[in-house]
Image (spheres, helix red, strand yellow):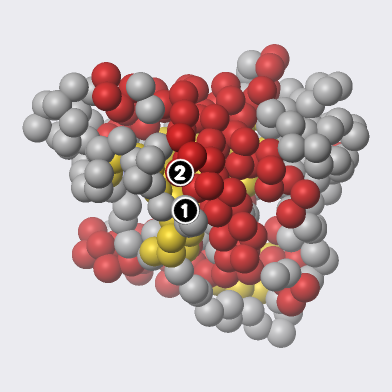
Amino acid sequence: MLLGVSNIFRIKSLSLTRLLSVALLVVVLVSLSPIPSQAQQPAPVAPATTSPAATPTAGGVAGSATSAFGAQTQQGGLNIAVLDPAHGGTDPGARGTGGIRESEIVLDFAVQVRRALELQGFQVVQTRQGNENPSFDDRSATANAQRGAVFVTLHISSTGLPGTARVYVNSDLSPVANASGLIPWDRAQAPFLGLSKAFGDLVQGFLSQRFKGSPDTAQSASVRQLRTTAAPAIAVEVSSVTVEDRADLDRMAPGVAEAIARGAAAFRPSYVVAHSPGALP
Ligand SMILES: [Zn+2]
């Protein structure tokens, strides 16, 4: 279940009001200039990565290893994936008649997605590890604290053909940067829309190979979580909580994980670091 802008105005009006009043700004120049040797640790809301496998090693992304797709990866490029199991805590997300809760399924999916990403050499940072419910802004803050990262938010829908999966990228946002290159927090995604679409199309391509009936390319939608994220960012939505047996969803997890990881690996050569917002696609 994806929350769009209209939902947010209804559900999270307090949060938006706070956002507007605080007028929190994102320094685009900093966001767009990954400095690998200074890659930041996750924000306090995200537990630090402890798995040894999460650290890129020789043969991983670091150095000049060749990916499964033959593309030369570059040192200091894309090496972090921020994984967001959506909902959680008091927000169960979509609920099926069989008692299936989106918030629980996405956490299980995240375990497999994480493993698949780590096998591709990514360091994975999760926005939640258990049944917590960080705010949209907390989750974006986790992503925005990274350098050289992609962001993936995981959802299970209540609609759509069971057994299919869709990738969404944020619909167009007007970048309202001022003369000093600052853009508002709630437009943080704007400079990354082109990269998000490229990343999303790659993941969707792998998903459509695995799950027949899925779209061929990523779709655009107003997704609240993506809007405040200053990184190539996608939402992956799996159908659906309406299955009678959750095993039907569990069986999809390895394929979804592989598609996301292969898509992220294939996206690496497209991850071009620019030194000014205007230079981005
Ligand atoms: Zn959802």
What is the C-alpha distance between the residues marked 1 and 2? Answer: 6 Å
How many residues crowd mark 1 within 10 Å: few (<14), some (14–19), many (20+)? some
User: Which residue is depicted at the point 70% across and 70% down?
Assistant: 281
> Looking at the rendered structure, which numbered label has been put on residue 216?
1
Rendered position, 92 above or below 173: above
Residue drawn at the location 53% of the way across and 79% of the way down = 174
Q: Is residue 239 visible?
A: yes
Checking the image for residue 124, the label placed there is none
Q: Secondary structure at mark 2?
A: helix
The mark nearer the N terminus, 1 or 2, is: 2
Which residue occupies the extreme right position in the image? Answer: 64
Neighbour tally class for label 2: few under 14, some 14-19, many 20 plus, Cα within 10 Å:
some
Amino acid type indicated by mark 2: Ser
Q: Position of residue 88 (x, y in %)?
A: 31, 35
Residue 38 visible somewhere in the drawing? no
Q: Amino acid at mark 1?
A: Asp
| 118 to the left or right of 209 | right
Q: Position of residue 186 (x, y in %)?
A: 49, 67
Is the C-beta separation of discs 1 and 2 under 8 Å?
A: yes
Q: Which residue is mark 2?
A: 208
- Residue sitting at x 63%, y 41%: 264
| x, y percent for residue 250 | 33, 22
Pick whichever, 228 or 235, lies toward us: 235
Where residue 210 sits: x, y (%)? 46, 35
